[in-house]
Amino acid sequence: MSTWIIENLGHLLTSASILIAFTTWLVNQKSNFRSEKINHTASILSQTKTVKHLAEADYLINNLINKNAKISKEGITPEIEKPIFLMLNYYESLCALSELGVIDKKTLLHLRGGLMKRTFYLCEPYIRQYRHEQGRKEIYAKLEKFSEQFGC
């Protein structure tokens, strides 16, 4: 057996070198993919500052959060309802993309998680009424799950 090892030592070392090179390449690829996913997530989240209607809706939501004003369907004006609806849909989409692994969940949580949870809490009466009106319990369910799961 030891003669076989000595005779094939060159082949064994070559195979080991190839295995090490492949493993290194694989680790680098995974690291690059994660970096790209984080950059992609940050790019998507930056839309709340660069896309006009999202920036305006984000500003309104932040003001309502600062006032700690709960939102319900009663007495809500179209000027307030439209941006709230927009941000809820945007956050629901982010949660869906996160669940699918398209965007990075940790980055989403770190950069926007607290605001998403506070928005859900602020709009919870509105969401519950909207679900009841539509007869669809799944409306904004991903945002609700995200808010509960991560406790931002």
Image (tube, rainbow, N blue to C red):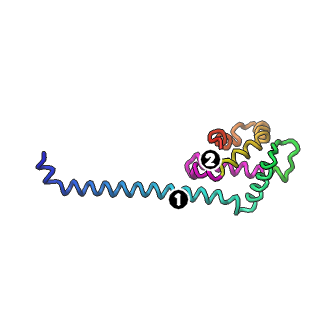
Q: Residue at x 77, y 36 (%)?
A: 132
- In this figure, which residue is indicated by the disc labeled 1? 36
- In this figure, which residue is indicated by the disc labeled 2? 96
Q: Which residues are magenta?
A: 84-111
Q: Residue at x 49, y 56 (%)?
A: 33
* Left or right: 54, with 101 as reference point: right
Looking at the rendering, which quadrant does residue 117 occupy?
top right
* Mark 1 vs mark 2, CA separation in Å: 19 Å
Q: Position of residue 106 (x, y in %)?
A: 57, 49
Q: Earlier in the sequence, mark 1 or mark 2?
A: 1
Quick one: quadrant of the C terminus?
A: top right
Q: Position of residue 90 (x, y in %)?
A: 69, 51
Which residue in the rendered view is the most extreme toward the left?
3
Answer few, some or many: residues within 10 Å of disc 1's Cα (few below 14, many 20 plus, some between 14 and 19).
Answer: some
Q: Secondary structure at mark 2?
A: helix
Whether residue 96 is in magenta: the answer is yes
Q: Position of residue 101 (x, y in %)?
A: 55, 49
Whether residue 48 is in magenta: the answer is no
Q: Position of residue 64 (x, y in %)?
A: 80, 49
